[in-house]
Image (cartoon, helix red, strand yellow):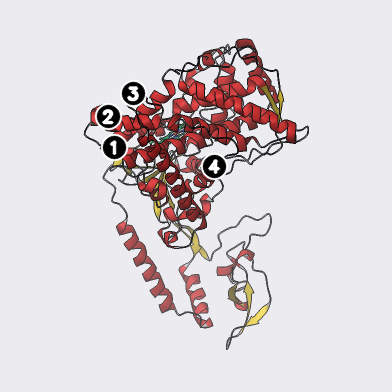
Amino acid sequence: MRPLPCDRRLVGQPAFRGGAYKAVRKWPFKLPGRRNQFTVQKSEFQTPPGETPLPSQSHQRTSHGWVPSPLKMKAAMSLVESWGIISVTEVLLASAVFCLTFMVIRSFQQKIPKGLKRLPGPRSYPLIGNVLELGRSNPHLTLAQMSQKYGDVMQIRIGTRPVLVLSGLDTIKQALVKQGEDFMGRPDLYSFRHIADGQSLTFSTDSGEVWRARRKLAQNALKAFSVSPSPNSSSICLLEEHVSKEADCLIKKFLQLMKEEKRFDPYRYVVVSAANVICAICFGKHYSHDDKEFLSIVNASDEFGEVAASGNLADFIPVFQYLPNRAMKKFREFNTRFLRLLQNMVKEHYKSFEKDNIRDITDSLIEQSQENKVEANAHIQLPKEKIVNLVNDLFGAGFDTVTTALSWSLMYLVTYPDIQKKIQEELDQTIGRERRPRLSDRPMLPYTEAFILEMFRHSTFLPFTIPHCTTKDTVLNGYFIPKDLCVFVNQWQVNHDEKLWKEPSTFDPKRFLSARGTEINKVESEKMLVFGVGKRKCIGETIGRWEVFLFLTTLLQQLEFSVPDGEKVDMTPQYGLTMKHKRCEHFQARQRFPVQSSE
Ligand code: HEM
């Protein structure tokens, strides 16, 4: 900050002394044609240690607190004038312009209908809004803190865009479930326009009839290819078959890495396994852990998450859309490459499509589109290119989330070895060593289930849902909320709310168990928010939960994970659409016993 010019005579003047304030003499310097002056830095007008700042006689009390009295102000103004820097007329003119601008801005502000309240929130700066307070590293924490001051419904500004921030489980359920239609839109964000050519089920602004029909198609296809019985194995459904196969490959890979390198970075391999499950469901395809093209797509998804996170400035300050933006360029390249890969795969499916042999989700979508099977919306067509976009949505949403859940689980397991041991004891007692875990084992493994719930709650690696948008003018908790307002739903705040959870920062799976510890406490588990709620709720929730359960139980039945003695893993989350932990390259796995599969 530049030092304030200050006449020697001002020091000691009551208007500047302000009672307990004192000015400190600094170096002298000369302004051309003016008297000797010396500078006083703003920060030097401090209350001397131990003293409370007191209003002096030179101040008077107003609705804005203590301000210099008009007489003293006049004296100070004439001094300012005597420096020849600005005249009183100029000061008055500047004040008039300021007041006029302020009044014009106020007149553009939304009129609030009678009886309703204006949204509360922090003051924001022109152009940048509240970006400085929010920061880029932990906006979910800052907003959780702000909600303590402004409440569950508040408005901030990111750049030039006003954003409604929702916190508190009851308020979020009221908005997204009870008033679901009003809050189900997606905002028109610059980065979202680049996903799937703006045709994404998840990110496009469409929330009308076409979106509803496509969501139904995707749900039908997911159900068919996760729950339907597996024709070739004893698994109860195709999902179980695919996950068991992938988990076995992962175990082999970890053991091979232990033999060759004595340590490994689990994320690098978990991501391929999770991507392979969704690939099998979508295209009936499997890739090896070393397939270069597959790896490049899978790894580029991290950058997707970073840009798609609500921190992309171009989404909120339009001028950034026209400036060079490296992250955005990579994001666009990734989307184009990903879409091209999917287009090729869908083309292959069209070539070999047989009505009587539906092999995977892509086939199911082709069949549904040809037969117009979306009952309630039979008139809505699903052309070929839209099928690619739907597969894109399922593939993208389906592997990054599951990978992140699994890698956080492994981090918690090595950080809390006692918890890992307890899960393994439960697995040994319930399943034993002779067979693989199955989905039907879930009710018999309450501690394992409680661990997964606590991993979701404690990490809340999706701190916000995907941004929503209001579809019409509405009212929430007595506040007027205009149409087309971007909405952030703070899931992290709910999962760490002291009103809902005892010691929320402690990692303790037992909080999700009934008093006897023999089953999951339903009331507690329903408070946890990680898949969103209401009309935009995740359509892969069942698949996601099942995958995490099957991967973890299969891995933990056979392997014990650790890090070398004395080493700790870094659990600091790195902000993104899905928050990741720092990669850890010194994981170790020890085989507990060889499983003789009876299947
Ligand atoms: C642990 C795993 C998962 C988590 C934590 C998760 C979480 C979420 C969240 C928070 C949303 C946004 C909800 C909102 O905007 O209000 C979402 C949307 C979505 N998820 Fe998931 N998800 C997971 C797995 C999956 C899987 C496996 C699939 C598909 C195979 C999937 C497909 C989708 C789709 C298509 C949407 C967009 C729905 C819409 O906009 O209408 N998710 N998910």
Q: CA distance from mark 1 to mark 4?
A: 41 Å
The answer, for residue 511, to whether it is visible in the render is no
Whichever of labels 3 and 1 marks the residue nearer the N terminus, that label is: 3
Q: Is residue 195 above or below residue 3?
A: above
Marks 3,2: beta carbons within 8 A: no
Whichever of labels 3 and 4 marks the residue nearer the N terminus, that label is: 4
Name the foreground residue: 70 vs 306: 306
Of circles 3 and 1, which is in front? 3
Q: Ligand 1 is in which quadrant of the figure?
A: top left
Residue 489 is labelled as none
Residue 382 is labelled as 1
Marks 3,1: beta carbons within 8 A: no
Position of residue 525 measured from the top left corner of the image (x, y, whole percent): 49, 23
Q: Is residue 272 above or below residue 561?
A: below
Spot the residue most to the left: 379
Q: CA distance from mark 3 to mark 4?
A: 52 Å
**What secondary structure is found at the residue carrying circle 1?**
loop
Give the class, few, some or many, for how many residues have Cα within 10 Å of label 4's Cα (few <14, many ≥20): some
Q: Which residue is mark 3?
A: 356
Q: Of the residues shown, which amino acid type is indicated by label 2?
A: Val
Position of residue 234 measured from the top left corner of the image (x, y, whole percent): 50, 14
What quarter of the picture does the C terminus occupy?
top right
- Number of labels in the image equals 4
Name the foreground residue: 81 vs 543: 543
Q: Which residue is mark 4?
A: 141
Q: CA distance from mark 3 to mark 2?
A: 19 Å
Q: CA distance from mark 1 to mark 2?
A: 10 Å
Marks 1,2: beta carbons within 8 A: yes
Q: Of the residues shown, which amino acid type is indicated by label 1?
A: Leu
Of circles 1 and 2, which is in front? 1
Of circles 1 and 4, which is in front? 1
Position of residue 562 measured from the top left corner of the image (x, y, whole percent): 71, 29
